[in-house]
Amino acid sequence: MTDVKKFLAQLSDFDSALKTARRILVTAPAAADGDSIGAQLALRRMIGHRFPQLEVHIVNDELMPDRYRFLPDVEMVETPDSFKGPAEFDLGVIVDGGIDRAGRVKEWFDRCPVKVFIDHHAVSVEYPYTIRIVEPKACSTTELMYHLSQTSFFSTPIDKDFAQQIYLGLIFDTGFFRHSNTTPEAMELGAQLLRTGFDFTRVGERGMLERTFPSLQLLADTLNRAERVAHGKIIWSVLTQKKLKELGASDDDREGIIDQLFLTQGIDVALLFYELPNRETRLSLRSHGNLDVATFARSLTRRGGGHTKAAGANVELPMEEAIPWVLGKLTEALAQSKPRVE
Ligand SMILES: [Mn+2]
């Protein structure tokens, strides 16, 4: 249950800071997902409603995936390449993850006199944020954002557009109310949002399920390459830059592949190695619960984290070196983990 009463002092500080600010930066960790996009757009509406005179700029390190381009206000999301104007702001807000993963926008955030952190992840790195609003009980940042929006500090009207932004984060982070982080409150919020009458089928299909044709082929290729280790408890596969180019697939086309791997009977953990253009490797991890993959990801690198059952990390190794190293560590970690009680 998200009880925002405990954030009254932080909200009051946030409100005071907004009152004296002129230019606001809103950002999220790179490789923005449905929750972080939804949360950034929702926050922009919240601030815009309460303080219409403020300039609110949403800037993300990477170009936003096409799948989110149907969302209201989405044209407001910029990258450092498209952003015109001075990268100087009176206040910065990072949502849905720490500033350490914000890429080029980190420098801009570092220079903000007031730094706000709004998140629902349980683990976060040390950083001198001015205001922290962190609620691990919220299943998505947009759920937390919704509750903040209904306080007297924001009093945001819930129209169809705002509802879609909140809803996308909700279904993204709960996997359509399926993952274990789903709470009765999250479903109640879903119901409340649906009452605004927005097209929830479209939000689910466009924002979560649809694939481009190259993405479909990429999924097929990755599933074909899947292998199991640790007596079948770990399933893993790879996604290379070469394959991406060959199929004409984009970075975003890897979305959901890890979830498909994870739906294999008898496994404990699914792991996807994704080769980055800079010769580093991005890992996606899913766990049924025997192993806390967020802790595992953080044990590999500072640039790792997430949730107990779904996590990610960037390791500074080319894929051919990352594969044996990570598989070794993961097999070891899994062997030491306590079996879950069914
Ligand atoms: Mn999230």
Image (cartoon, grey):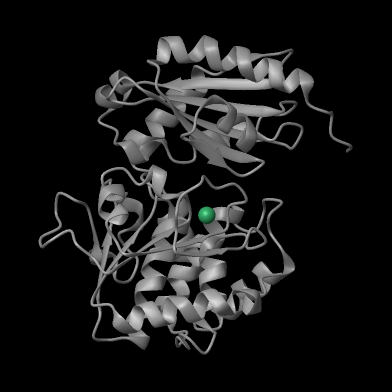
Pick the residue in front: 29 or 91. Answer: 91
Count of residue discs: 0
Q: Where is residue 214 in the image (x, y as percent from the top left)?
A: 32, 34
Pick the residue in front: 231 or 147. Answer: 147
Q: Is residue 195 left or right of residue 28?
A: right
Pick the residue in front: 194 or 124. Answer: 124
Q: Is residue 78 left or right of residue 178?
A: left
Q: Position of residue 134 (x, y in %)?
A: 57, 61
Q: Where is residue 29 in the image (x, y as percent from the top left)?
A: 39, 48
Residue 261 makes an appearance in the image:
no
Residue visible at 34% across and 73% down?
A: 44
- Quadrant of image for the C terminus: top right
Q: Is residue 19 above or below residue 183?
A: below
| Quarter residue 296 falls in | top right
Q: Position of residue 74 (x, y in %)?
A: 29, 65
Q: Is residue 118 left or right of residue 29?
A: right
| Quarter residue 243 falls in | top left
Residue extending furthest toward the right: 341
Residue 312 makes an appearance in the image:
yes
Residue visible at 44% across and 54% down?
A: 128
Pick the residue in front: 328 or 73. Answer: 328
- Quadrant of image for the N terminus: bottom right
Q: Is residue 158 above or below residue 29?
A: below
Residue visible at 30% across and 59% down?
A: 69
Residue visible at 70% across and 15% down?
A: 332
Q: Is residue 103 above or below residue 270?
A: below
